[in-house]
């Protein structure tokens, strides 16, 4: 009887420990579930495929993906990261968001991780702070308008080399029944401004220097930029109700071939082609000065910065997932399936959309000026002045108002 009770006790302990081990789902020793948070909903299908490959190669790790819309990402992400319960792997925008999250201590130090060496070192510097690699930018995008090549060919149009040429291009498109530029009022101010300002103020630190008072939005270069955006709007080169048009609505205008250009950037190509798989797109940057005065041809950004949450209890598994995404063959698959150039070395682009844009990799482009601003309120003042102009405020008044907001934020 004594032996029977002892045997039953061992069986009971075995069942209890076995069940608890299988149901935990978060232990490094058996099965770990990591949270992957990002903003690119248009990439979810591709990521699901890659996650399946990762899980097949790493059967003890599961990846739960969570997508936050890009316009909510900055405000929602920090709440998700707090406490380490979500976002074991997360993505960050460069600039103000990266600065905010680094000050809050959310980035793990990736400096000595082997996978960092698989990236083009010149394209990942914006993921560094205080000598440490805190995040690795995964995407290389061109933050300038994309255009419908078939419409341009039909009307015998080519990307212009100066401001007068750009205005004439827009007028020709308008005369032929097209909206020259689909402009989402919620997000385009933060994108379109970059190529508009790159030659008006070619100093790569101009917007960064707003934060220490060395440049001002009331200076001639920013007033000129606002005046040119205002000119495009007043001449009817944007769609009606610019400020009331959200990004999805503007994407539909170019996907349906009602608009010839889209004021965002190359990162939007996959969203456009999801609505119209047959559309062929290329990229151009408005040149706002005479051709012989232009220093830059366009804008580039390395973004979608992969990071490990410093508060995560599953850092080893999180690092394995980033290492997996950093492999050349996986990065190649991601790039071609999402129409996104990447910063990983030796990737081969086979996607027609990417091959079309590949020449931009070797053109003289400026890193996106907006992302040199590390103060979120200063960034809001800059983009807000564009929205003010689109809403009817004069460029001078909009610039002065914005500079007043900058002064308030840098004096606090």
Image: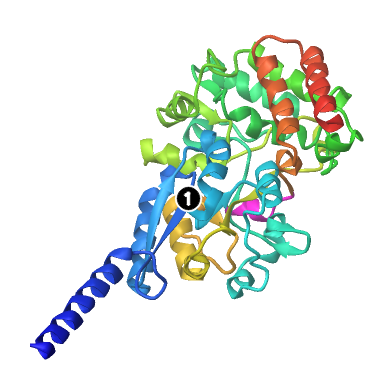
Say which quadrant the N terminus sits in.
bottom left
Relative to 252, residue 238 above or below = above
Relative to 53, residue 376 above or below = above
Determine whether, in the image, residue 88 is placed left or right of residue 287. left
Magenta residues: mostly which secondary structure? Answer: helix
Q: Residue at x 58, y 39 (%)?
A: 74
Camera-side residue of 41 and 248: 41
Relative to 66, residue 322 above or below = below
Determine whether, in the image, residue 386 is placed left or right of residue 68. right
Q: Which residue is mark 1?
A: 37
Query: In the image, which residues are magenta?
Result: 358-364
Relative to 301, residue 313 above or below = below
Residue 26 in sight: yes
Q: Residue at x 71, y 47 (%)?
A: 99
Camera-side residue of 180 and 195: 195
Camera-side residue of 369 and 346: 369
Q: Secondary structure at mark 1?
A: strand
Q: Residue at x 83, y 17 (%)?
A: 400
């Amino acid at each position: 009887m004594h032996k029977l009770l002892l045997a039953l006790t061992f069986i009971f302990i075995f069942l209890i420990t076995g069940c608890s081990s299988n149901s935990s789902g978060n232990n490094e020793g058996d099965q770990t579930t990591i949270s992957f948070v990002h903003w690119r909903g248009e990439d979810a299908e591709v990521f699901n495929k890659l996650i399946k490959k990762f899980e097949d190669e790493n059967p003890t790790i599961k990846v739960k993906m969570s997508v936050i819309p890009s316009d909510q990402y900055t405000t929602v992400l920090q709440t998700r990261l707090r406490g380490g319960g979500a976002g074991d792997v997360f993505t960050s925008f460069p600039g103000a968001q990266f600065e905010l999250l680094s000050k809050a201590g959310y980035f793990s130090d990736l400096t000595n991780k082997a996978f960092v060496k698989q990236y083009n070192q010149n394209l990942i510097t914006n993921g560094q702070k205080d000598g440490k690699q805190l995040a690795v930018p995964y995407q290389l995008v061109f933050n300038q308008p994309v255009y419908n090549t078939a419409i341009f060919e039909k009307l015998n149009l080519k990307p212009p080399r100066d401001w007068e040429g750009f205005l004439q291009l827009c007028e020709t498109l308008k005369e032929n029944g097209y909206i020259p530029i689909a402009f989402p009022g919620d997000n385009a101010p933060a994108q379109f401004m970059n190529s508009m300002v790159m030659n008006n103020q070619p100093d790569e630190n101009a917007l960064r220097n707003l934060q220490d008072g060395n440049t001002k939005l009331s200076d001639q270069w920013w007033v000129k930029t606002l005046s040119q955006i205002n000119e495009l709007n007043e001449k009817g080169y944007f769609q009606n109700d610019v400020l009331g048009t959200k990004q999805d609505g503007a994407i539909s205008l170019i996907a349906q071939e009602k608009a010839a250009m889209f004021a965002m950037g190359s990162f939007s190509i996959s969203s456009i082609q999801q609505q119209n798989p047959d559309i062929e797109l290329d990229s151009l940057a408005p040149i706002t000065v005479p051709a012989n005065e232009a220093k830059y041809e366009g804008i580039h950004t390395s973004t979608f910065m992969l990071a490990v949450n410093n508060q995560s209890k599953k850092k080893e598994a999180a690092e394995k997932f980033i290492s997996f995404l950093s492999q050349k063959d996986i990065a190649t698959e991601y790039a071609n399936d999402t129409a996104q150039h990447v910063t990983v070395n030796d990737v081969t682009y086979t996607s027609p959309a990417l091959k079309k844009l590949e020449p931009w990799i070797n053109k003289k482009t400026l890193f996106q000026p907006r992302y040199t601003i590390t103060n979120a309120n200063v960034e809001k003042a800059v983009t807000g002045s564009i929205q003010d102009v689109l809403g009817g405020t004069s460029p001078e008044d909009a610039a002065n108002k914005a500079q007043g907001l900058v002064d308030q934020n840098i004096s606090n």
